Every structure is written in C-alpha cells, then in structure tokens.
Image: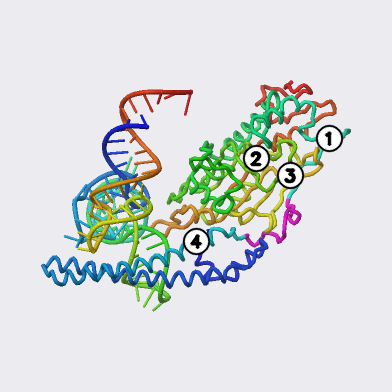
Amino acid sequence: MHDIRAIRENPAAFDAALSLRNLAPVSPEILSLDADRRSRISAAEAAQAEQNRASKEAGAAKGRGDEAEFERLRAFVTAKKEENALLQAEAAALDAKLAELLMGIPNLPVDSVPPGADENDNVEIRRWGEPGRFDFTPKEHFEIEGVKPGMDFETAAKLSGSRFVVLQKGVARIHRALAQMMLDLHVDQHGLTETWTPVLVLSKMMEGTGQLPKFGEDSYQTTEGWWLIPTSEVTLTNTVNGDLVEHASLPRRMVAHSQCFRSEAGSAGRDTSGMLRQHQFEKVEMVSITDTENGLTEHGRMTRCAEAVLEKLGLPYRTMVLCGGDMGFGARITHDLEVWLPGQDRYREISSVSYCGDFQARRMNARYRPEAGGKPEFVHTLNGSGLAVGRTLIAVLENGQQADGSVILPEALHPYLRGKTRLGADGELV
RNA sequence: GGAGACGUGGCCGAGUGGUCGAAGGCACACCCCUGCUAAGGGUGCAGGCCCGAAAGGGUCUCGAGGGUUCGAAUCCCUUCGUCUCCGCCA
C-alpha cells in the first residue's frame, strides 16, 4: 500500500520509481481520484457536522421541554440524514476505489535497483565457491542412481497429481536434516527467534503481505475460506498485523520452517521434471521487523544469513540484485541467491531476500512509536528464504554426486545424519 | 458440537441511551520536591481521515457488519474471536 500523501507531494518521483518496474505512470489517475475523494469527504463531513449539531440541539430542546422546537429539529435531522447518507456513500465509494487502486500497485524500487525487464537484467554482486569439476557428465538430481530409490514422482502423482513428490530412505533423511541444520544455524548463530506458525491463514493476512488481492490464483484457498500460505513470510510478517509494537522490541528477527503451498499457475511446462517446482514444499524462512532507520541495513544482514547456509554446505552460489522488472510485488530491493546445479549446468534461484520498507506495514497497519510521546510510524519488513529446503536438497545431491551413483554429503550435515557421510547408490545412507 | 461469559485507548480496567473519545490505574514524557539505587507531588499523553501555512476546527473509530432512536460504547440482530464447563479428539 502506498502513502497517498507521498504521491500527492511528489507524483513525478512516484511514477519515476514505477517506471523502473516498466510500469506506466499512474499518478494522474491517483491524484484525480484523490482530489475527487477529498472534496466528497469534505462535503460529507460538513453535512454530518450539521446533522450532529441539530441532533444535539434537539436533545437540548427536549431537555427544556420545548416540544415544538424539538419536533422541528427532529424533522430536520431526519431529512438531513437521508441527504448525508448519499454524500457519505459517495465519499466511501471513492475512498474504496482509491484504496483498491493503491492496493494493486507494487512497491517502489529503491534507487540502487538496476533497470531491466526480466531475469536477464539482474546484476551479479557476489560469487562464492567454484562449480565442481566432474570427470563424467553430471546428472540432474532425479537421475542420480542413489537418489532414485528415495524420490518417487509416480507414487506422488497417484496420490496428488503432478508437481508432488514422495521422499524415502536416505533422501528423505537428508531433506529433514537440511531443514534442521538451517534452523539451528539461524537460531544459534544468527540470533533469530525460532517460530512455528499456522499454515492456514485469513484473507486479511494475505492482503497484509501482498499476495492478495492481486495474486489469489497463485495460492490455494480452503472451502472454509482459509488460505494455505505460499511461504511463512505471510505468518511471520503478520505477527505484527494491527499492532503498535514497542520500539525496544525491534528489530524482531524470526525464522520458521514450514510447508509452503503454491498453485504455480502460469508456470505450466516449466521445470516439470524433478522436484525443483512443487505445489507443496518446505522452506526455512526469515523475517525481520525493523524500525525505519535500520531496514536497509537489515537487508544486508539477512542476505548474509542466507548465504551462510550455502557456505556451510559448500554449495557454490552467486548473489544477484534483481532488476526492476524482475522484482516481486512487495519488494523495494531483492537479492536472489542462485546455487550452482551441475545437472542443469547453471545457477538456479534458491533464496530470495527482500526489503519491503513500510509497504506491508501500511497494509497491515503495523506501527511503532519512534520516540516516547511521538507519532506512531510504520515498521519496516524484510523476508528471505534461508533456504528453500527442497531446492537445497537438489543442490546437495547434484553437487555431491559421484560417478558410481552415490552422493558425498556436506560435512555440516553429518551430525544430523547420525554420522553418515554418503548416500549410497542403493539409496541408503552409509 | 452443547451451555454460559466476555471483546473498551500502548497495557489493565470503569462505564447500560445525550453532559463519553471515554473514570481510574499502569507505562511513558516534562516539571517540582527529595538528595541518592524502583519514594512523593504536578502537568501532559488514543488513532485514522478531511480542512488549514500554523494555531486550530471538523469527522470517524469502544471486535466487525447491520438495525432501533432526534441521539448508542450503552438497546436489538448477525458475525468473528477469546475464555469457562460438558462432549469429542491428535
């Protein structure tokens, strides 16, 4: 949600920022609606004031027993009421229309976001690790001999259709170990607060973080109206929904491991083999709630937290700044971490770390008081994967694969695998 | 699922038709006193929106939505949530 005052004050800057996202200027439409709306509100409020005054006078007249005056005023109020209802409905309609328009406009990129149309224009800012050299042609994760016994797409399809997977044996264990390791790292080393949340949420929460109203088709909704979260960003961020939080409690840094559900509408045909793109997957998600001062700094910190996971696992990656055209709806700036997948011979997204400024906070009405006695301000929010567990599994499997179909596992995982260091070609840990 | 109670400002908590955006307390801010590690006194202190350069004014908000009434935090209906007891249950 955007600050209508900021748009009013500097419409050119607003449109300029949107142009970074390759969007046409909308400020003229907004400003005209806003002007309209304000004049209606003024009129409606003036009418209401008149009615309130008369009503009060009616009470006074009745109090002193002036029946005639009371009747006169009562009739006046009754007549006014109808008039006002009309004015107020008009004002409310314009207000709603403006809110709807604003709700549908994505967040404004910060100045440092590179221009561009799509992922090809993203800019690499860091690279860590060297893609391993193989003396055979590396396979995709689902083709590796040792992976096959524990990654069953046929059975999953029987159970649930396409884009699901059943994991078993060593692969299932590694998958679980990864999530545990990430959670421990963030909680013990990075100081994030371990959190466990519902995966079913109210529409209002999906609006708060920006999934709704525009992107409803990307998520699933139950017959009772709940939404299945596409990421625990939704629940973690909305923990402050509607709150006026203590300044001293900021920053609030949280991490959760959850199931995520995505319809993947619009990605038909993309990444159809393997478990890269599933309707249901696990993710360890980080969210920070900060004050206005520290939002951007926090972004760097969070990116480092995500990178640390890959480094701990010894997985080569590069860090990208997304260009304006490739950024998500709520972000002002996004770092994508792309992990090297030898089977695909390319880097693939494994984490996305976004700074949202006060965009989500406005939608959620989440505020803090910067100084005692001062006016409340909106908090700033950030979210980032740390990491997508399924994709990390893929990366571990592909990067560790051996000619004999086994997989050498990262040291960081050993303690979580009862000391086992390798996924055998038969699918069992050894 | 059945029965009952409740939902008020940052927090706690009064308030059953007008004088209530709302007592009191806590927290917080400033001042005084004391003079020395959390005592006492005073003052201030809800938020959104609209008008205004500002001062200030108007309007809305007592879970949400609707209704009764000249007038509702207060009455009625609906709905959501919380708590208690019973039932069921991982």
| SS type, badge 4 | helix
**Distance between the alpha carbons at the discs numbered 3 and 1:** 21 Å
Discs 3/2, front: 3
Q: Residues within 10 Å of mark 2 (few under 14, many from 20)?
A: many
Q: Which residue is mark 2?
A: A387
Q: Residues within 10 Å of mark 3 (few under 14, many from 20)?
A: few
Above-or-below relation of A279 to B27: above
User: Residue drawn 35% across and 69% down?
Assistant: A45
| SS type, badge 1 | loop
| Residue A89, image quadrant | bottom left
**Distance between the alpha carbons at the discs numbered 2 and 4:** 34 Å
Q: Amino acid at mark 2?
A: Leu
Q: Which residue is mark 1?
A: A138
**Distance between the alpha carbons at the discs numbered 4 and 3:** 35 Å
Q: Quadrant of the C terminus of chain A?
A: top right
The mark nearer the N terminus, 3 or 2, is: 3
Q: Which residue is mark 3?
A: A270
The mark nearer the N terminus, 2 or 1, is: 1
Q: Nearer the viewer, residue A398 or B16?
A: B16
**Distance between the alpha carbons at the discs numbered 2 and 1:** 23 Å
Q: Amino acid at mark 3?
A: Arg
The mark nearer the N terminus, 2 or 4, is: 4
Q: Residues within 10 Å of mark 1 (few under 14, many from 20)?
A: many
The mark nearer the N terminus, 4 or 3, is: 4
Q: Are marks 3 and 2 in contact (CB under 8 Å)?
A: no
**Magenta segment boundaries in residue numbering:** A109-125
| Residue A231, image quadrant | top right
**Distance between the alpha carbons at the discs numbered 3 and 2:** 21 Å
The label shown at residue A99 is 4
The mark nearer the N terminus, 3 or 1, is: 1
Residue A53 x/y as whole percent: 25, 70
